[in-house]
Image (spheres, coloured by chain):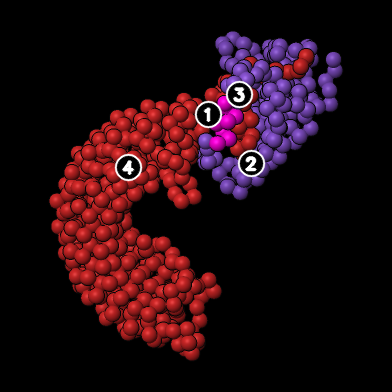
Amino acid sequence: MAGSVCINEILTDDELRAILGRLGSEKDKEAFGLVCKKWLYLQSTERKRLAARAGPHMLRRMAARFSRAVELDLSQSASRSFYPGVTDSDLCVIADGFRCLRVLYLQDCKGITDAGMVEIGRGLSSLQCLDVTYCRKLTDKGLSAVAEGCCDLRSLRLVSCRLITDKLLHALSKNCHNLEELGLQGCANITDSGLTDLVSGCQRIKFLDINKCNNVGDSGVSSVAEACSSSLKTLKLLDCYRIGDASILSLARFCRNLETLIVGGCRDISDESLKSLAAACKNSLKNLRMDWCLNVSDSSLSCILSQCTNLEALDIGCCEEVTDAAFEGLGTREIELSLKVLKVSNCPKITVAGVGVLLDKCNSLEYLDVRSCPHITKADCDGAGLQFPACCKVNFAGSLSEPDALL
Amino acid sequence: MANNGENPSPDVGGKTVKLKADDGEIFEVEEAVAMELQTVKSFFDDDGVSYDTVVPLLNVSSTALAKVIQYCRRAVELRAKSGDDEGANEKAREEREGLEAELVREESDEGIKELILAANYLNIKDMLSFLCRAVGDRIKNKSVEYVRRFFVLENDFSPEEEERTRNEVAWAFEGVDAD
């Protein structure tokens, strides 16, 4: 175009990035990339996050083009999967091509094996976050290679990787001292000595999920409590039936920042240790799930309700000893509960009287589960004239979707 | 050429600086405003250059320079208004954004580009930033060919390369972005 002002010469990469930054829609960003090779390079290297369904050929092209990608999501799901799925050779391409990668999501990529993990450990030294939930073929061998190669690992999710043993925990302890999140739900081979080993090196753990790791007992949990005392915020011990009062007392003694505790199914836990926990974590505790803790009674529950002023979610389903008395203590006091979710299913001794006292002190309730409570039916509630907060859903018979604060 | 109405002589008794555009037109500007133009500031930072010296700005047209001066004058005023008070800061920020919008609204594409060249030559970072953002707005929803013409750029992809790049985007990505 004769006479048209040409600003191309004076625009630096920064200015071009400023222009690109103004383009919100995918379509405009694509158009930017198609203008010329330099602009394609800028657009591609600006892109930090990718989600894809792609075989090795396309992955190679993506790696070449989006060389500075920091996050890659290849997780599969019912709505998002392709044949034959992510394979070890794909992981090889990723390890070679995405050198800056920090976050890699591979949930449900059921075809991957240790060979792929070895490649990840070899190539992605900056990796901080790896999620291989449901990748059931993985064993200590592959994941230890990740631990050894990716020393800055902060978050590792291994839900249902049931072949994992204490050996991996040893590798993590040796190599990954910045580890903050570890998800081992369903890794039932884990034992107390593995946990003790883990926290000798990993002392910054904030989130530990050992749901259904039923070989774990008090000594393992106590080691975790002591070693990660200032950092531990979430501890999940669902169905770890060997856990007892000693674990709860350790948590009370060491972990003043504990926000979420799941001990459903840990039926040896009794009132005394829970009272200590309530006193110690009265400011921090937000989510407490203790369904099936059959020894729990009014004395600890009333302490929890009156002391843990930031409690938002509580599950005491099947705690058969609990009665209305647990709530009555609240009646005389000037307190306002922050509770949003309360599950008291299968607590036959609680009646609408107890629920009434609770509602009086709690305006924030969003979900109440009273299934299988013979004295709390819809008719009972209406008859007692109970006033639920406007947004509150009440589950009398099992048809509502559950909030996931307590999963 | 006589001073045009956009550049009244400053009536304050402070120091002024003379700037000369590419066609010889002289603009007399308050010192504080002139120092917004980093190029001018560097000119005077050299030892021994007296403030009476006329600064030659050979790469800036008088139309562009007039607008730059107008913008910088208002920007300096607004900056003086903001301080520790969050409310005052917020108001000053809004006014500045209004000023920027006003400046670009009436400009043709060629006009914006001239201002970019001027802001670049005179080294006024803030102005260059918002001008680039304005360009981003102007190329939204436009075709690739339009963008090439705007920037006077050659397409250096081969037809195969261009086809391949278009295809990658079409089926490989789920579109997760938002950095």
Give the foreground label among 2 and 1.
1
Q: Label 3's element?
A: helix
State the CA–CA distance, disc 2 to disc 1: 33 Å
Which three-letter amino acid code belongs to the residue tagged 3?
Glu
Horizontal relation, residue A334 to residue A296: left or right? right
Label 2 CA crowd tier, 10 Å (few <14, some 14–19, many 20+): some
Tell me the crowding category of disc 4: few under 14, some 14 to 19, or many 20 or more residues within 10 angstroms, Cα based.
many
State the CA–CA distance, disc 3 to disc 4: 40 Å
Which amino acid type is marked by label 4?
Arg
Q: Which residue is mark 2?
A: B93
Q: Nearer the viewer, mark 3 or mark 4?
A: 3
Picture layout, residue A338 above or below residue A173: below
Per the image, the residue denoted by label 1 is A44
Whether the residues at callouts 2 and 4 have beta carbons within 8 Å, the answer is no
Q: Earlier in the sequence, mark 2 or mark 3?
A: 2
Residue A238, placed above or below residue A107: below
Q: Which residue is mark 4?
A: A154
Q: Looking at numbered disc 2 in the image, what kind of residue is underneath it?
A: Arg
Q: Which mark is residue B162?
A: 3
Q: Label 1 lies in what chain?
A: A
